[in-house]
Image (cartoon, coloured by chain):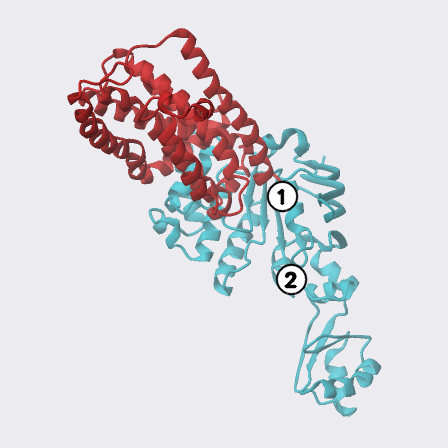
Chain colours: A cyan, B red
Amino acid sequence: MTPPPLIVAHGLEKRFGDFVAVDGIDVRVEAGEAFGFLGPNGAGKTSTMRMIGCVSPRSGGDLSVLGLDPAVDGSKIRGRLGVVPQEDTLDLELTVRENVLIYGRYFDLPRAEIRTRADELLEFVQLTDRGGDRVDALSGGMKRRLTIARALVNRPDLLLLDEPTTGLDPQARHLVWDRLYRLKRQGATLVLTTHYMDEAEQLCDRLVIMDDGRIVAEGSPRELIERHATREVVELRFRSDAAQTAAIPTLRAVGSRIEELADRVLLYTDRGEADVERLTADGVHPETLLVRRASLEDVFLTLTGRTLEE
Amino acid sequence: MATPLALRVAAHQAQVYRRFWRSSVFAYVLSPVLFLAAIGVGLGDMIDQQNATVDGFSYIVFVAPGLMAAAAMQGAAADSLWPIMAGTKWIRVFHAMVATPIRPRDVYDGTVASTTVRAGAGATVFLVVAALFGAVPSFWGVLAIPAAALCAAAFAAPLTAFAATQETDLRFPVIMRLAILPLFLVSGTFFPISQLPDWLQPLAWLSPLWHGVVLCRDATTGTLGPGSVVVHTAVLVACVAAGRAWGVRSFTRRLGQ
């Protein structure tokens, strides 16, 4: 028998007055999955997460989390969730270790048990030697790792991460990813939002792409790329707008589809190198040229006509 | 048995308080003790030399319970404004709490309860100091401690609710100067409200502080009457109840939307 899904949403809506933040989405997350909401800022990802996290009541539709209704059993569900919010909510007045200890008290765990877990968790997020420091003194990446440690203190059945690496430098991001990877391997169920396509590709088994409160596509990163993008993408940058405009007809003749952006042109193709040779032969000489594999960014662009990071 | 959710919030407050107890010692103890020394002893001596009494008591005996209730009000007011803004907007620890089994209403209850307990603890220390000054003639004076705590709660409940509705702390100094300070001066703290102009007296009855001052004074002077205790307590409890009704809504709106 397969275990029941941890999250089931049907026609889930969130409205703030006249503004519709989430416009009727269907989501199903199974135990052991790493599931992602990918989309630009304002797509409705955080509103969705807050409804799943049982801090924000839904405006319409059905939602079940861990088999329970958030409108009825919010407190009970939250007791089994781990939440890493987008903005840090660490207590700057307390030490690193105290932050984990007091958070454990919110779940009414026995103090001795919290102390044991705090030591384990600080070890896990590589903050053991900073345990006695004030949170003020930590870097952004350390704060995020501490927030993850804190979210794990109740051994949650479901870990919700809202933009887990936004605002972090590349090295700090990789440290966070590495920890999340380990959790995944240990069988944790992760639900995360992100507007970084590389984050979604690295961490998510399955994801939905959100835009303007709606889900526009769903699948594994590989499926989505196969379905909505070509195998490869040629990125061309031109010296001037005039040069770009002049090259467009040739590009159209070569590629299966092209996308004109403010600073570059993308040419979707299944044989990048061959196309580049043809373009050169046809007299197209861009300033820079790059052949790469298609990514979720391309999927988003294809589906919405916009880039993820505005 | 599970720890009540509001108590888990209070546990956090106690943890943070270990770092901040000094500032509250100033508000709840040092400040009223300075007033007691300057006004109670200094001014009191002058009044005593005229062989005058206030409502039948020496001035220091009259003023000490007033200062006790007033300090509870002032400390509770300050504790219910800026720290709430820190929890909802600046450091956002309240948002961390409501991601756990704790609900917005528990955050409200836990914070108001903590403020009340701090005020009660401060009042206890002040009462001991006042007794050393000879300003507490009756053993009934111990009942001034719950009276002062209730007075603190009567302010903490609505002000905590209000603070959660605010986006910035711009209005907080205005409240301290235009509401709390005038109440401090005209609620029977330093002189009986019968000294107020006739038209102002009904306004003093509306002041929760006056009810707190009367309760504290009747306790320290050993003149508690059951009717008076019931009435003044009822007024303060009504302030707490109204404040809580507002606070449950404002905290839910702020933390749970």
The residue wearing badge 1 is A50
Q: Which residue sits at x=63%, y=49%?
A: A46
Q: Position of residue A270 (x, y in %)?
A: 77, 74
Mark 2 and mark 1 in contact? Answer it, CB < 8 Å. no
Which secondary structure lies at badge 1?
Answer: helix
Distance Cα–Cα, label 2 vs label 1: 22 Å
Q: Name the residue carrying label 2.
A: A197
Is A214 drawn above or below residue A167 in the view shown?
above
Q: Residue furthest front?
A: B198
Q: Nearer the viewer, residue A20 or B43?
A: B43
Q: Is residue A287 left or right of residue A249?
A: left
- The chain identifier of the residue carrying mark 2 reads A
Q: Nearer the viewer, mark 2 or mark 1?
A: 1
Return the x and y of residue A16 as percentages of the image width and height. Answer: 69, 45
Q: Is residue B13 visible?
A: no
Residue drawn at 73 percent across, 45 percent down: A27
User: Looking at the rendering, which quadrant does residue B154 occupy?
Assistant: top left
Residue B101 is drawn in which quadrant? top right
Mark 2 residue crowding within 10 angstroms, few (<14) / some (14–19) / many (20+): some
Farthest residue, direction top: B226
Q: Going 45% across and 13% down the picture, which residue do you hit?
A: B231
Q: Nearer the viewer, residue A27 or B167?
A: B167
Residue B173 shows in this picture: yes
Q: Amino acid at mark 2?
A: Met
Sequence order check, earlier mark of 2 and 1 = 1
As drawn, is B49 to the left or to the right of B16? left
**Marking on residue A144:** none
- Identify the amino acid type marked 1: Arg
